[in-house]
């Protein structure tokens, strides 16, 4: 149940950012859910491989190259999902930063206080 709730919150974040940010389009709520699912799968399968291949660049930039990897994941999702579009690399980079921030805020509501 928690996985489905996280997926829906990520879809909400994708939908909100796509409506705010110029250069990013998503076709409705169902499209946002599909984008969130594809991003989750890409982050699970592709991102670790990219991180390993780009480890020297990531270490040299003190981790900032991970932002580039996130933007590449967004661009891959753009190619895989028909109802999702990103206009440029820089838009994907900004989208990935905003998505990370909004996901953190939304998922902080899921955390339970452990006393």
Image (cartoon, rainbow, N blue to C red):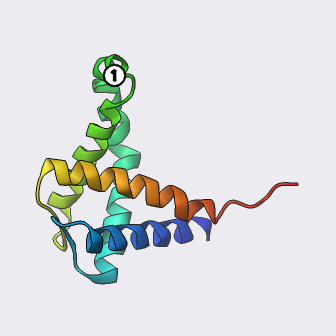
* Residue 61 percent across, percent down from the top left: 32, 22
Residue 37, placed above or below residue 100: below
Quarter of the image holding residue 67? top left
Pick the residue in front: 82 or 19: 19
The image quadrant where one finds the C terminus is bottom right
Location of residue 34 with respect to 70 vertically, above or below: below
Q: Looking at the image, is 47 positioned above or below residue 24? A: above
Crowding around mark 1 (Cα neighbors within 10 Å: few <14, some 14 to 19, many 20+) is some
Q: In this view, does 65 lie above or below 27?
A: above
**Relative to 87, 106 lies left or right:** right
Front residue of 34/23: it is 23
Tell me where residue 72 appears, x and y as whole percent: 22, 45
The percent position of residue 58, horizontal first and vertical second, equals 33, 24
Tell me: 24 left or right of 62: left
Residue 47 position within the rendered picture, expressed as x and y whole percent measured from the top left? 34, 40
At horizontal 34% and vertical 35% (from top left) the residue drawn is 66
98 or 72: nearer the eye?
98
Query: Measuring 25% from the left and 46% from the top, which residue is drawn there?
Result: 71
Residue indicated by mark 1: 55
- Which residue is painted at 61% across and 66% down in the image? 2
Q: State the image quarter where residue 65 is shown.
A: top left
Q: What element carries label 1?
A: helix
At x 37%, y 19%, the residue is 59
Dividing the picture into quarters, in which one does residue 98 lie? bottom left
């Amino acid at each position: 149940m928690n996985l489905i709730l996280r997926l829906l919150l990520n879809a909400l974040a994708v939908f909100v950012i796509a409506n705010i940010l110029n250069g990013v389009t998503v076709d409705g709520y169902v499209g946002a859910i599909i984008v969130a699912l594809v991003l989750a799968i890409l982050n699970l399968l592709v991102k670790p491989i990219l991180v390993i291949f780009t480890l020297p660049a990531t270490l040299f930039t003190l981790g900032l190259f991970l932002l580039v990897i996130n933007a590449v994941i967004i661009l891959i999702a753009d190619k895989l999902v028909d109802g999702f579009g990103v206009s440029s690399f820089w838009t994907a980079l900004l989208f990935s930063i905003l998505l990370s921030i909004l996901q953190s805020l939304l998922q902080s509501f899921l955390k339970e206080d452990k006393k």
